[in-house]
Image (spheres, rainbow, N blue to C red):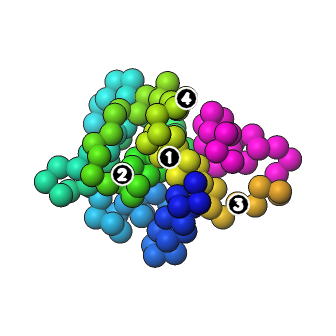
Amino acid sequence: MDWIKNAIHKEVKKHKSNDPFKIASSKNILIRYLPLGSTLGFYEKVYRQKIITLNHDLNNDYLMRYVCAHELGHAVLHADANTPFLRKNTLFSTDRIECEANFFATQLLLYDKVLEDYETKFDVLRESGIPYEMERFL
């Protein structure tokens, strides 16, 4: 998945940030907040406009950031594909594009972290607000 790491490096360098909200804004990707029930978020492209939709009922800023990073992964890696809704169970998905978006989100949010500075993988995930299920992408 070196090509994904290269894409992340390019985005962070270009936008001088690993914040998914800042990157999306700089790329003119519309972020909207809607009540989505059990759906965490989704990405779509409508008439050449890239749109990330996040569940406005997420009461955890870290989870909101992770979901935005995941959907940004779709916008960068799968720009022309409207993606399925991200739900909690999608975090375990083995579908290729979902795995790639999870890898993108995890690596983006950990971009400036040195894993050796942490006692366990779960420590860095907890500090960064990344779901523990993403441990496989470290």
Q: Residue at x 66, y 35 (%)?
A: 132
**Other-residue count near label 4 (Cα within 10 Å), few / some / many at <14 / 14–19 / ≥20:** few
- Cα distance, mark 2 to mark 4? 19 Å
Which residues, given as a range, are shown in magenta?
A: 118-138
SS of the residue under disc 2: loop
Between 121 and 97, the one lying in front of the other is 97
Q: Percent from the top left, x then y, of residue 56?
A: 35, 37
Which residue position holds label 2? 78
Going from N to C along the chain, the mark reached first, 2 or 4, is 2
Q: Residue at x 35, y 32 (%)?
A: 85
Going from N to C along the chain, the mark reached first, 1 or 4, is 4
> Would you say the residues marked 2 and 1 are in contact, meaning their CB atoms lie under 8 Å apart?
yes
- Cα distance, mark 3 to mark 4? 24 Å
Instruction: Name above or below for residue 69 compared with residue 15.
Output: above
Which residue position holds label 4? 92
Between 120 and 2, the one lying in front of the other is 2
Which residue position holds label 1? 100
Going from N to C along the chain, the mark reached first, 2 or 1, is 2
Q: Percent from the top left, x then y, of residue 88?
A: 49, 27
Between 49 and 21, the one lying in front of the other is 49
- Residue 114 part of the magenta-drawn span: no
Q: Residue at x 52, y 75 (%)?
A: 13
SS of the residue under disc 4: helix
